Amino acid sequence: MDDFSISQQRLINQGLVRSKFKNSKEVVKWFGAVQAQDYANAKWAIGLRLPNARNEDIEKAITKGEIIRFKI
């Protein structure tokens, strides 16, 4: 496998292209967890994997408890 094919497959495997996710809950469930240095970057990681993602939708999923925020 050449470098380009490896990089393309990695993007697919990470859910960054050809995403089939319909909501934040599906993204977090698929990963098992999302971790970031700060809150905004965790939401950004989810949003990158959702077609037509909106910050409000991710916030709503957190508020409703569909995905949880654990802060140490």
Image (cartoon, rainbow, N blue to C red):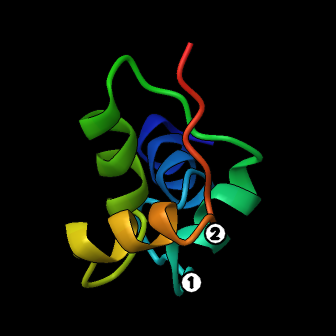
Task: From the viewer's perspective, tell me whether residue 70 is left or right of residue 32.
Answer: left
Q: Amino acid at mark 1?
A: Lys
Q: Which residue is mark 2?
A: 66
**Relative to 5, residue 61 above or below:** below
Q: Position of residue 14 (x, y in %)?
A: 56, 51
Q: Closer to the camera, 49 or 17? A: 49
Q: Closer to the camera, 30 or 68? A: 68
Q: Amino acid at mark 2?
A: Glu
The single residue placed furthest to the top in the displayed view is 72
Task: From the viewer's perspective, tell me whether residue 40 is left or right of residue 67.
Answer: left
Q: Position of residue 49 (x, y in %)?
A: 42, 65
Q: Closer to the camera, 14 or 46? A: 46
Element marked by disc 2: loop
Label 2: how many residues lie within 10 Å, few (<14), some (14-19) or many (20+)? some
Q: Which residue is mark 1?
A: 20
Residue in the picture at 37% in, 17% down: 37
**Relative to 9, residue 55 above or below:** below
Mark 1 or 2, closer to the camera: 2
Residue in the picture at 54% in, 29% down: 35
Element marked by disc 1: loop
Q: Closer to the camera, 54 or 16? A: 54
Q: N-terminal of the two: label 1 or label 2?
A: 1
Q: CA distance from mark 1 to mark 2?
A: 18 Å
Q: Quadrant of the C terminus?
A: top right
